[in-house]
Image (spheres, grey):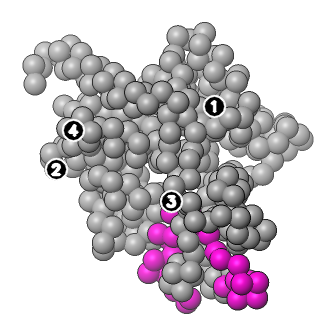
């Protein structure tokens, strides 16, 4: 799977998208067939997959965290399952945020592990089994909708309403991971995040398919004292502009902005440049939680930048506060029906 989205994917389709269309058609055929024919392992606990239609971030990790909090409020023991993208470990591993660095386990698993037991595994069926062995009673997958070999009891597809589907083309002409019809068929529901209009097409398609649509927004946390400060904002996420919008929502002015690719580990020169700008201007530095964890254990002056970079966290706020509970209840009901269908009463 392509991990970085070139800028032309997020603009109106042009000659680059058209030139790659024959490859995209083949890619879509293969991706759709794999989704239809995938042999999936079933597990005795409910499995919720939080995925998205496109390459690049849409808000999956904050959504997964919100679901875990809702599950714990219900007395459940949730566990996260992640591929560990960006990490070097290729064995199934329980993530320990006190000892692991992002270069080993990936940045998102470190954030997930702060909330609940988290396992990374390149083979997600093995990771799911490890979670079951560790005693979890609800598995929440962060990504893997198009490629995982697990039976999903609930598949929630997240879409950013400002970016939408980009140019709407399949990889490599655009950011769409698999044919939309097949993705919609296997989805349980949609979650739109934000107040943009770029997801309207999918919302209408979901309505025609009888799929529920949940709505939510990203809300910055612990930022009351930022005020109207002028800041240096930097982010290595799929859509740095989303972070810059978040900074503005706090009332701060991100006069100096630096955007890097998703999961990017800053070079020594990039670290020094940010610190030099801060020394020269006197502006405070702000970044994302994901970027902060990537600096831990880094080389050069990475630790200095981490200490000087204030984290602006975000949380998913569902327009319907009961929505996370409804999603969990639906997953539990689906798992119960699945087990009864297989002749299990456990």
The percent position of residue 59, horizontal first and vertical second, equals 55, 44
Mark toward the start of the polypeptide (2 vs 3): 2
Separation of disc 2 and disc 1 at Cα?
37 Å
Please provide the residue range marked out in magenta.
Answer: 275-302
Separation of disc 1 and disc 3 at Cα?
42 Å
Separation of disc 4 and disc 2 at Cα?
13 Å
Frontmost of labels 3 and 4 is: 3
197 up-or-down from 339: above or below: below
Mark toward the start of the polypeptide (2 vs 1): 1
Marks 1/3 in contact by CB < 8 Å: the verdict is no
According to the picture, the residue beneath numbered tag 3 turns out to be 222
Looking at the picture, tell me which residue is in the foreground, 79 or 214. 214
Mark toward the start of the polypeptide (4 vs 2): 4
51 up-or-down from 286: above or below: above
Dot 3 lies on which element? loop
Frontmost of labels 1 and 4 is: 4
The tag on residue 28 is 1
């Amino acid at each position: 799977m392509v991990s970085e989205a070139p800028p032309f994917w997020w603009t109106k389709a042009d000659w680059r998208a058209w030139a790659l269309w024959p490859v995209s058609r083949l890619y879509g055929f293969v991706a759709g067939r794999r989704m239809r024919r995938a042999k999936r392992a079933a597990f005795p606990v409910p499995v919720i997959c939080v995925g998205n239609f496109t390459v690049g971030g849409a808000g999956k990790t904050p959504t997964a965290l919100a679901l875990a909090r809702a599950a714990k409020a219900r007395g459940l023991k949730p566990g996260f399952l992640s591929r560990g993208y960006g990490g070097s470990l290729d064995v199934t591993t329980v993530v320990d945020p006190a000892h692991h660095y992002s270069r080993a386990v990936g940045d998102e698993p470190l954030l997930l592990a702060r909330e609940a037991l988290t396992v990374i595994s390149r083979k997600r069926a093995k990771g799911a089994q490890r979670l079951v062995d560790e005693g979890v009673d609800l598995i929440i997958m962060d990504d893997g909708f198009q490629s995982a070999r697990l039976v999903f009891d609930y598949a929630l597809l997240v879409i950013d309403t400002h970016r939408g589907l980009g140019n709407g083309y399949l990889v490599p002409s655009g950011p769409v991971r698999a044919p939309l019809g097949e993705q919609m068929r296997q989805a349980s529901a949609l979650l739109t995040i934000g107040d943009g209009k770029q997801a309207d097409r999918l919302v209408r398609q979901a309505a025609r398919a009888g799929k529920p649509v949940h709505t939510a927004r990203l809300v910055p946390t612990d930022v009351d004292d930022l005020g109207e400060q002028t800041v240096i904002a930097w982010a290595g996420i799929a859509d740095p502009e989303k972070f810059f919008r978040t900074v503005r929502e706090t009332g701060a002015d991100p006069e100096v902005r630096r955007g890097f690719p998703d999961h990017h580990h800053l070079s020594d020169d990039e670290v020094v440049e940010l610190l030099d700008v801060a020394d020269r201007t006197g502006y405070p530095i702000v970044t994302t939680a994901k970027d902060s964890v990537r600096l831990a254990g880094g080389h050069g002056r990475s630790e200095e930048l981490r200490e000087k970079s204030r984290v602006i966290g975000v949380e998913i706020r569902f327009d319907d506060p009961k929505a996370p509970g409804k999603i969990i209840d639906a997953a539990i009901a689906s798992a119960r029906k699945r087990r009864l269908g297989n002749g299990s009463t456990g």
